């Protein structure tokens, strides 16, 4: 057949002129927010009563939002006590979870109760790296390879440039990935207590400017081309870490599982085996049960970037039925992106949630990562047991009652 | 070597007795929330001032949260006007985005401006299915296959049972996936305006009870074993849809790209090619730029389950450089899980955000899906152009100033 | 930076004129093969003595090769007896394996011995489908969806057209996969005893010609666009089968494992768990040990298309430690592409190898699939045990002696 | 429901006693082969006439096969001249392809003709590494991390041990991948002209013995646990190379594409875009057309391990439509496992095929890798054009005539 250039139909341009959302000179003010809300009422006919009821001065939002009109009030429930045996987090925590999904808090709470009785959750941050992955194009693969050798030889200078752009960031190493006539460089930074995406972006940008000034033959350059892989789950990040790589583990005595979970370790382990098989066949990025639930709820509560749930929800679960009947359960989160400084962490409720965990500010990011991982583990076991004990649907029926 | 049974060290049990978060008889009340907050103050020493300042009666939260103490106030910014040429959404929308990431609203706003001038975003919901995927174990693969034949032959009866458990749900079909001595059944429901996970769970549960009563030889049964794949990204869902499968597309004239985006379609297309290569090598579940940003921000604003960002952030981007210089850009979101009824959609600010979009309540879920997809497309193009025009880091520097 | 169009350096054109490999009017003859061999001697200076020593009339190769010069003599070893408890294959088989990898035959032989003692390998073909997956492009996603509805409504007519092009093929169903403005149709055929790629291609081609004559608005059409996915491993084929989906399973008593394998089921199972974890992290298309070894060796021996090892080597392993100490081991091969008719199956040594298995000709393809799967299982267990027993490297040292 | 332990039915033990394939004291002799053939005749009733007709002394097979009975005679066709502009391979080659798939040689031949006219194929080996990936288990993740630090600190000593076990192998580095309480170490070797799996296995084994003697607290050890990932395709190997990473690239003038391929670069490029989309959706490990065909045929001809087609068939294709109308086409093969020494390379026909390419023996492996990649590229373009020009099915009809 003749392949004609395809085209999409274009809708008629709207009759009314385009009306932008108003901005004021002093834009992070109640007045500006109200002005925009009035505009919204005008163009939509809707009169929101709750969005505009926030408890802080909009000035605190500068740097976090544009065209501010108010807030989403996301309910927070408290699960706990969570007993953590980490290196950064040690002891008892009450965990704020912001969610609208009924049973979520109750389910995590149940898991925390079980693991409290089992002696707590052991947590370990095993790696730490935030990336930006610029790509350089050359005449051909051979030239790309030569560039890679140059980068290796000039690492000290590149590191110097990159780190000149940031206070908190340190360039750990640069990984190289070649395909076609391109060399992708994966700049791995440690970023202190910030999540560090912007820091990494800025520092890499500066380093790349220097590289372009010092290396001839670069035909294309992009600061990012899907190898970081920001806001996306990828096998690369499962292998090589993005943010923190954290493992939470626990051994639960058999009688405890039976008493609290109404299931035996053997039953739970057998079900897990089938979930591993199902997940392998489905092509999951997470063979666990529902780590995204805790991660999303803690991210929303503590001012993390909730879009990072996309990548942070990847997980590797490994469990073992021990000879003494105990159940070893571990989850490794290879791309947990958390911060206790910068981003949304300083906003009023977000900061308070961090403070409830003793995690606000400098030197706390490892602690937060451990608490998140420990919480995730509690939920894995709780849901895993519920599926066994046929309680799952029943629990949703009872607690999640306003669902259709 | 001798492989001895490994064991994890157990922390000493905490000296103080375990203190549960208090619950009251009437638990969804301000009094109960305050009681818990007092408890938190006592055990943590922290005195939150903002979490407890919500604008609604806690009674509305029943079914959405347990151990309610207050709310996360997540800033909402408005992007728009967004011009949508959908089947359910037609015309102009102002989109509430709840986020703490600076530049996000501005970036989407810029893309909306471009696509408004280009005639808007064309959106299409091409598929709709919510799943629960129970698994049945047998003596061997042969028996699993025989069971599959029985399920096919008895589909009408199974459908009958499943649908008896729900008002809104309809069982579309049951897909079968065999591995080892297991048959996984993927129950595909349409679920009206609810996201439908609980509905699907409940209906599938009932159908499976019936199945177990009518089929001999089932050795194991689990209502879920990672083939749904709830709260997890999977290749299966990219292929076979979870929630809505939506495509947003637009053709942007070359001069418009240049004028608004400071980049040519040719430059943007070339960069996209390299992103496709990078993403393929990295093993991404999304070859786009950052769909998770819009999805997370709209989910938080409108009361969707934000944990679903894990799966809803998967995306397939396809672009074309047309002969007339125009740039065709499309994104297909294969697992967009949205609701306009049930879950968190009825909470005060969440409902208001849906109302701002004209999406609250019955018969609106297709409209919401289209608006989300259209918003996502605007952000894809905006960030895609920024990477080209070297504006990306600079924009974050200017707007995201409270970052380290 | 300025992005200039990249270019690859071009080598100087060779001074000597281009010399094609000679072809004769009667090309599948010894004379033609010798003529080409003489040409090779002339242009390379090499005088092969063995390639030209084949035992058949080159006329038999027509349809299998072009520019025939002789044969690769690939050593065949025999493993067995293999005891199979299949539906198509029942009883004892001696399996020809063509390979150059030392220890391969010995390893499979050892596994066969173990599973013979355990009562044999149970095999089941659970699905059968060969595909071609044409793609149709439209103005937009909406038009692609409409086309999909038309295809569903016109399935009978399309099936009619497709089947008119083939004797052996039956069109089972057409799966639809939409992305952007494209609809991919996956035509699933059963193909009798042929592998069926060409049959499927031909029949789909004819159906697509008919479709193009009867449906307006198709803007692009390709008979294949990486959704089949011929000669490539894909998650789609793991989920939905390509060729035969076969499961081989066995339960091995604990004392047998110990006696023959010098390992306990518990040790083997524990190691398997770690392999599952490793494979999940690595992103494998096969969590087993080395199914490709048996598949490649049997494909080479029996005239299968060895390029299909790319897709046929995908596998799903699931094992269980039973309460009585027995070890349940299963492997599911979701894309085993085999034929007992057509392709290379009629060539002299290839046909003889099929005959040794009682698998040459009509009605035998299920039997061959089951024997391959049973062989694969024997090797999985053998290597699995060797890794445990630290015998692995030692075995290669002893048997694979001409390696560096 | 009650979950009872599942069990598979066991077939009745065969009545006749188990008859092993006979072995003689001098087993790599014609007498031994004939003895086994006689045995096969006896137990199967089949009288093979061709398998036993090989042209060499079976003694040459020791180390390559066990239970030798004869050979598979796989037809070899010659494609060429192939013009290569590599670093190791320069000039003209005539490529032996062992296959039974009609049209394969013709298709590669056509692509070679096109790329000859275009100035040849540029090839580059960009990386070289063969792996064994042992795993060590500990009490917990924290202990696994500590072990990783020890490995880094003791790299020199480990390297020393590893290299003491091999002449040709050099330990390049050890990558670490942690999950749960396990640390996987990926030992990356360069292996000279051998494929090197056995070398890597042996050297890693020795290093691991040393490690176990010098590090306390190791609870489990396996020499391999699916992170190498031998005989399996994996994302890890696409990212980090297994064997050689080779890129082949060419720029083809527009008029040449039209004249030889009956398609325009624009048409080919557009089709490629859709293949990229299809492959992304399908979850392929190779977005190209059919690299497995050339790789399998060259592996069979030249004595490579054909089971490695499983991993070597992964590929990354990237193409560009240049401003002057030329078509840039590249393929990167990230896990090409080839040898010119050891394994099957010294067998009679296999060695001759290597000699025809000037690739037998020491110092030739880079050359062979480049010729394979160049051949692959020719086939990619040839099939890519055929799909466009609707010649694909027609060609199979004409040349692959003995198919059903």
Image (spheres, coloured by chain):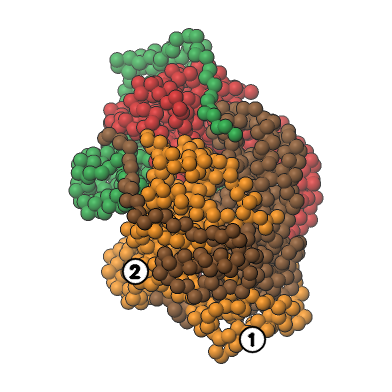
Chain colours: A brown, B orange, C green, D red
Q: Looking at the picture, tell me which residue is in the foreground, D140 or D116.
A: D116
Q: What element carries label 2?
A: loop
Q: Is mark 1 on a helix, strand or loop?
A: helix
**Image location (x, y in percent) of residue A360:** 71, 67
Which residue is found at the position 27% from the left and 39% from the top? C205
**Image location (x, y in percent) of residue A270:** 53, 67
Q: Mark 1 lies on which chain?
A: B
Q: Describe residue D400's horizontal placement relative to residue A283 as left or right.
A: left
Which residue is found at the position 68% from the left and 41% from the top? A206
Q: Which disc, if any, is residue A234? A: none
Q: Describe residue C285's horizontal placement relative to residue D391 as left or right.
A: right
Q: Name the residue under label 1.
A: B35
Quarter holding residue B44: bottom right
Q: Looking at the picture, tell me which residue is in the foreground, C258 or A206.
A: A206
Distance, label 2 to label 1, CA atoms, is 40 Å
Which residue is found at the position 26% from the left and 48% from the top? C171
Q: Mark 2 points at which residue?
A: B363
Q: Do labels 2 and 1 share a chain?
A: yes
Q: Describe residue B2's horizontal placement relative to residue C282 as left or right.
A: right
Quarter holding residue B217: bottom left
Which residue is found at the position 52% from the left and 83% from the top? B57
Q: Which chain carries label 2?
A: B
**Image location (x, y in percent) of residue C105:** 52, 40
């Amino acid at each position: 057949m003749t392949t004609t250039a395809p085209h999409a139909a274009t809708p008629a341009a709207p009759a009314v002129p385009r009306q932008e959302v108003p901005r004021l000179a002093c834009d992070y003010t109640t007045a500006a927010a109200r002005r925009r809300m009035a505009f919204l009422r005008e163009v939509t006919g809707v009169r929101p009563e709750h969005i505009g009821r926030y408890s802080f001065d909009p000035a605190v939002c500068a740097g976090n939002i544009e065209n501010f009109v108010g807030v989403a009030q996301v309910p927070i429930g408290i699960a706990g006590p969570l007993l953590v045996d980490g290196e950064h987090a040690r002891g008892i925590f009450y965990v704020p979870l912001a969610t609208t999904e009924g049973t979520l808090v109750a389910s995590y709470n149940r898991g925390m109760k079980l693991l409290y009785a089992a002696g707590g959750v052991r947590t370990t941050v095993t790696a730490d790296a935030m990336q930006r992955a610029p790509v350089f194009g050359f005449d051909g693969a051979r030239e790309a390879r030569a560039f890679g050798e140059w980068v290796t030889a000039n690492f000290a200078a590149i590191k110097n440039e990159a780190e000149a752009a940031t206070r908190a960031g340190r360039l750990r190493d640069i990984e190289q990935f070649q395909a076609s006539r391109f060399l992708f460089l994966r700049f791995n930074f440690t970023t202190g207590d910030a999540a560090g995406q912007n820091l990494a972006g800025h520092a890499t940008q500066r380093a790349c400017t220097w590289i372009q000034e010092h290396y001839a033959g670069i035909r294309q350059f992009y600061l990012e081309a899907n190898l970081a892989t920001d806001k996306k789950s990828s096998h690369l990040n499962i292998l090589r870490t993005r943010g923190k790589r954290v493992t939470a583990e626990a051994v639960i005595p058999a009688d405890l599982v039976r008493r609290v979970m109404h299931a035996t370790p053997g039953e739970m382990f057998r079900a897990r085996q089938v979930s591993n098989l199902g997940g392998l066949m489905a092509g999951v990025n997470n063979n666990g049960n529902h780590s995204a639930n805790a991660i999303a709820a803690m991210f929303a509560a503590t001012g993390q970037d909730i879009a990072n749930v996309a990548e942070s929800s990847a997980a590797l679960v490994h469990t073992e039925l021990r000879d003494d009947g105990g159940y070893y359960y571990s989850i490794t989160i290879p791309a947990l992106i958390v911060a206790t400084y910068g981003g949304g962490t300083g906003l009023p409720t977000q900061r308070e949630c961090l403070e409830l965990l003793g995690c606000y500010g400098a030197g706390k990011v490892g602690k937060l990562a451990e608490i998140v991982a420990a919480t995730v583990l509690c939920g894995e076991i709780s849901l895993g047991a519920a599926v066994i004990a046929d309680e799952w649907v029943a629990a949703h029926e009872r607690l999640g009652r306003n669902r259709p």
